[in-house]
Amino acid sequence: MVQFVIKRLFLGIVVLWVLITLTFFILRFLPGGPFDSDKKLPPQVLQNLQKKYRLDLSLEKQYFFYLKDLVFHFDLGPSFKNPDRSINEMIAVSFPISLQLGMCALLIAFLVGIPLGLLAAYHHNTKWDHIFMICAISGVSLPAFLSGSILILIFSKFLSLLPAARWDGLSYMILPALTLGLRPAAIIARLMRGSALEVMDSDYIRTARAKGLSESQVVYKHVLKNSVLPVLTLAGPLSASIITGSFIVELIFAIPGMADYFVDAVFNRDYTLIMGATIVYAFFLISANILVDVLYRFIDSRMQVT
Amino acid sequence: MKKIFRVAFVVFIISFVFLIFINKDKKPTQQNIFRFSITSDPPTLDWSKATDHVSIDLIENIMEGLVQYDEKLQPIPAIAQSWDVSKDGKKYIFYLRKDVTWTDGVALTAHDFEYAWKRLLNPETAAEYAYFLFDVEGAEDFNLGNTKDPNTVGVRALNDSTLEVKLRAPASYFLHIPAFMVTYPMRKDVVEKHEDHWTHPENIITCGPFKLKEWQHKNKITLVKNEKYYDVQPKLEEIHALVVKNDQTAVDLYETGKIDILRKMPPLTIEQYKDHPQYINHPFLRGYYYGFNIEKKPFNDVRVRKAFAHAIDHKVFPEILKGGQIPVTSWVPPGMLGYEPDVGLGFNVELAQNLLKEAGYPDGKGFPKTIAFFDSRDDNKEIAEKLQQIWKENLNVHIDIENQEWKVYLKQLHVDPPPLFRLGWGADFPDPDNFLRLFTSNSGNNNTRWKSSSFDQLIFKAASEMNIQKRLELYKKAQKILLEEDVAIMPLFVESLNYVVKPHVKGLWVNSMERLILKKIWIDQKS
Amino acid sequence: MREVWKRLKKNKLALASFIFILGVLVLAILAPLLSPYSYDVSTGERLLAPFSKGHLLGTDFLERDLLSRLLFGARMSMLVGFATAFCALFFGTSYGALSGYIGGRTDNFLMRIVDIFYTFPSIVLIILVTVIFGRGMFGILLALTLIGWADVSRLVRGQILQTKEEVYVLAAKSVGLSHFQIVLKHILPNIVGPLVVTLTFQIPTAVLGESFLSFIGLGLKPPYASWGTLAHDAWKSGALRYVEYSYLILVPSLAIFSSMLAFNLFGDGLRDALDPKLKRSRS
């Protein structure tokens, strides 16, 4: 077990390093630089800026310095577009908000997806199956900017129940988390349905039924318990898709998270900001995956024992 | 199974009730608050380094400079109560008010200006707007690093209340420069003590009508009244600037009463508010044009350029964009000195077709494959599609259109300008020099490859001409060369501002520089 | 195959979805014949409501017939969807099959590359690719394929690892068939089911991915339009808030919604039908 964890950690670090290197060099291949704008800077002003941000050095040197700062000081560097703040400061403020939003969305996704999938499986090939699945899949059938806007239209404009946008407390979280959770909810529902169908078809469920257990007991005790595990392992990869998927949601709900760093920073050629956001994202993702794998192994081994 | 349904239903109802309950909004305790949206977190509040509108909007309300604009966008006294200009136009002496203090109670002096200007020019500051002061003697050399000695720069505090500025050449527009935020005074002790963090709310020291209270990054900025402000106290107690990047979201917030003004309206929203009493449409000093690379075929022939310009009916643009844009054939925009509506090539299909025929492409026959470039933005896309249609219909010429992401586009323009390209220009200061100097031979922003020494001479002569009437003559001549004789660019329209303001907001000054000056606004709680 | 078809036919919803998809495809292919106008020419009438004379679905901001744009939009959206899904499937399958079949260190190495792809934020990847390769069809396809292939390769690898040890594969090996033949004839046919299912899920993902690209200003270049760009253009102009203009957004949204739903439901039905474990399923 310990060996397994160490191996996974080591691999994670290697993946992270390759990722940093790749991103660093790909970014520099993009045409245009951080200081190009419709008002072209006089060459000397541009030179001053490049000097300040070490952009006048050779690429290898820049890479070396970047890596050095990162490894020894956990310093992600200055932002080219936000001279008052470092990348560390920017991410420290925005990341927790994105994380909070993502967790809420994931929670909603599981709360919606698992029952829908389970019920659909239970009513396999009946009209209920279809209705539940249509409900679940509706969430992935519209681009997020539309589903979000529709929710705002209904809940804030017509019903005046929830605030239309911004991030100021619990009631502000509901609509964005719901919008963001629609997609993973559909994925979870579908997986849950498949998994439950398999379990229900297995022999021990038949035995359980034969033993005369009540339907609800069968469903709760056996079907749910046995089919939910593979669905739970989705949490890792799903949380990743949620964080990047939140760009549109954060935009239309005016949430001060970090998703726009991935997009705007590329358009602004704010190299250090893209790097910073990517590294934090990858780090988070790798850790989440390792955690899920370890937990899964742990649960799995215990199940085998019992 | 039914039990699950029942439980789910109950949970649903409970959460619904819960929602209604927690959404009971606390009424704001203080009513004298103005709330508006900004499109991003301000990249910086350091006025030597700020370059974008959001930062400028905020800085303009927490700071003030030597001069400010009156309602006609002419410079009037602010911290400088008067000034003298030498006869040759190369020396300005500003006399400062003696009653101005910073928010920490320290008196403001001419040295604070000298420091701020030299900091802006210092290569180590790496300020993008350093070129704003290049008219000052020695400024360019210092910024370039040719000299390390800041004392060679022609700005000097003669005493605590007198600032002397020497120019390298007379500049008739110079008084506009100290109205811009990069020239505002700065506290040396504060900046040097906190370095990059001096703009944080706990450190920043300012002298404008409001001061920075709280800065929640990417979320909200709170300004409060500055009790120590030297002039008439502002009427607002607080200002909340909410970060809302998306225009649609801003509309939602306006319509649900969370912000008091809407400054960027989607086209259909404009249509809806068109006849509303609180709707404001105001010209904005930003020109939109298509330029030719006059070295590239087929636009190396001036007749083709003229034909393209004559084929355009300018009045279609406001119809498409729905924002009250002002169609123009001339370049200096309305609202600015030197606006000449009659200059430029007007809509004349017959003439256009003849010109194209003369150039060797009768009815568009044999016209080479040509691509017009623009940067990916929705309104640019609509305009480009419309132009494509216009040239097809009026000249029977097919122009391909191609868009690029903004930075890629800029790179392309600077390295190898496409035969036909879109660009815009927003005024740095409301003087025609700013709009026309753009197309002089040495301008870094002239992407047309068009160079005209007679045009250059007119512009430079106008800059040192103090008589307004004579300046206007010179600018008119220059515009004729640019737009009628050589047709290096085709201006299409001048953009306009579209605002809706809540009826309780009084005293808003809407101006063509898009400045949001809040010191005179008040909230009428009765309406 | 027949077995599958029989089971699929029983699932009315999946069958209806399948017919719907076929319908959309026919419309997309016949768009030039069916459209009353060209998709990029102005008709001289701006923002006409639906059911106006001559314009069944009205006209848009630039005076273009919305029905024609919708039909041509179907063409573009389906092209993006199918092309991306096939590219992702082809590349992902080859990669996953190679990795899983060879196994050992090579497998390990190849899978680490997939890991790297996974850890790279897909949003940054899409933007980088479209910025570098421009907004043409190629850039968009490449970007969307790059996101899709990793999933497929993992799936295929997993399946191959499972089937590799099955009796019939071992038997085939002992008979002396070449590796290529084994993979092609004995392993792939057994995983073709999951692959087709993946395909039906990749298509809607790609179509929505393209709409995301339009959202950030990197969608198809004008005057071409996909459903995504149609919906986004209308959304951006604020059409959703005003009843009289809502058709601008409702028309493309409904098109997207119904076809994405159809693809997903068909995929689900197909998976059910293909799953041999459910053969005895109660129905």
Image (cartoon, rainbow, N blue to C red):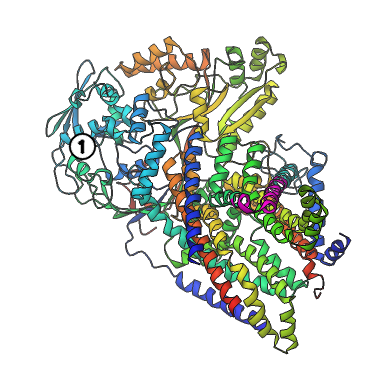
x then y, percent, for residue B213:
28, 54
x then y, percent, for residue B395:
68, 21
List the residue tagged with mark 1: B79
Viewed as shown, does residue A4 lie left or right of A210? left
Q: Secondary structure at mark 1?
A: loop
Question: Residue shown at 82%/42% (left/top)?
Answer: C30
Query: On the rendered image, what quadrant is the N terminus of chain B found in?
Result: bottom right
Viewed as shown, does residue C140 lie left or right of B255? right
x then y, percent, for residue B137:
24, 21
Circle 1 Cα neighbour tier, 10 Å, few/some/many (<14 / 14–19 / ≥20): many
The residue range painted magenta reads C84-108
Question: Residue shown at 24%/31% (left/top)?
Answer: B117
Magenta portion: prevailing SS class:
helix
The kind of residue on which mark 1 rests is Ile
Residue C12 appears in the rendering? yes
The image shows residue B296, relative to residue C111, as above or below, that is above
Viewed as shown, does residue A225 lie left or right of A5? right
Residue B409 covered by magenta stretch: no
Residue C87 covered by magenta stretch: yes
Query: On the rendered image, what quadrant is the C terminus of chain B found in?
Result: bottom left
Residue at the outermost right position: C2
Quarter holding residue B79: top left
Viewed as shown, does residue C45 lie left or right of B150? right
